[in-house]
Image (cartoon, grey):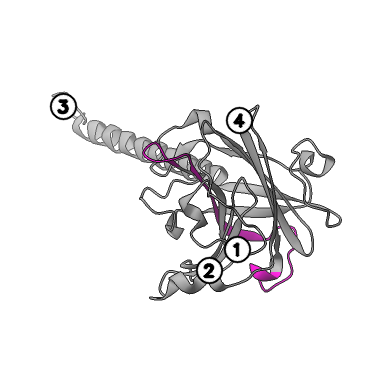
Amino acid sequence: MSHEIAVPGCKNLALQGSESMLKVSAIVVVGIAIMGCANRTEAATFKSTHAAQDVRLEVNPQSAFWRDAQPVYFDTDNFGHPVPWLRTEVRSRWTKNNLYLLFECPYRQLYLKPSPHNKTETDGLWNWDVAEIFIGSNFQDIRRYKEFEISPQGEWVDLDINLDNPHRKHGWKWNSGFQVAARIDRKSKVWYGAMRIPFRAIEPNPPHSGTILRANLFRCQGPPPDRKLLAWQAPMSNTFHAPERFGQLELVNRR
């Protein structure tokens, strides 16, 4: 607010000063808003680094293949609350045919499905410990995307998600042809899960550097009642299926 001084001829000066202050304030606010948007955009994008050829799936983050990938981390739950002891690392690479991901998942206590099988997919795998990516290429219909999950025991499930389909639970019958590998390091209390997803299951067009996909990363960790739901971009709800909260995955040539 401007304070006018009762001096003859100074009223207009006071008003001009007030208008100038308002203009400066507006510029500052807009600048802060732009900076905030830029930071949010940067924070909501992770990168997948190009690889010249496809490789056999492995779960060693120190291998030459995974060392060349730029990691992204998340350590908050589905409502954005910090869970630092479960800080999860994800690396991604891509070829002309496939998208690769490696999850590095620390844990305190595993919650594993008894009698696991990994020859066929496991419906309801999300009720146990899993790492997940939700990913889609349709920026107009964001309620259509794919879901890929892996457990510490190498179980897997892939789903074709259409949130507007009343029978969307049938999406688990879809088969993407993706492959997985997993390993548990019980001494260090870390498990690793790798995925190789055919691009044809995600995007009808051939991938190239600069391709951007809508994506989010998740984990379900530990037994009830202390079970944690973790997210890279917090859905701010009890379900991970909040596509309006997704971030982006960008394909790049090099790290």
Location of mark 1 (residue): 121
Q: Is residue 17 above or below residue 65?
A: above
> Which quadrant does the N terminus fall into?
top left
Amino acid type of disc 2? Trp
Answer with mark 3 or mark 2, whichever residue precedes in sequence: 3
Residue 8's mark? 3
Amino acid type of disc 3? Pro
Q: Residue at x 33, y 36 (%)?
A: 20
Q: Position of residue 125 (x, y in %)?
A: 52, 56
Amino acid type of disc 4? Lys
Location of mark 2 (residue): 172
Q: Furthest-left residue in view?
A: 6
* CA distance separating discs 4 and 2: 30 Å
**Mark 3 neighbour class, 10 Å CA radius: few under 14, some 14 to 19, many 20 or more:** few
Q: Position of residue 195 (x, y in %)?
A: 68, 54
* CA distance separating discs 1 and 2: 9 Å
**Mark 4 neighbour class, 10 Å CA radius: few under 14, some 14 to 19, many 20 or more:** few
Q: Secondary structure at mark 1?
A: loop
Q: Is residue 23 left or right of residue 125?
A: left
CB of mark 4 within 8 Å of CB of mark 2? no
CB of mark 1 within 8 Å of CB of mark 2? yes
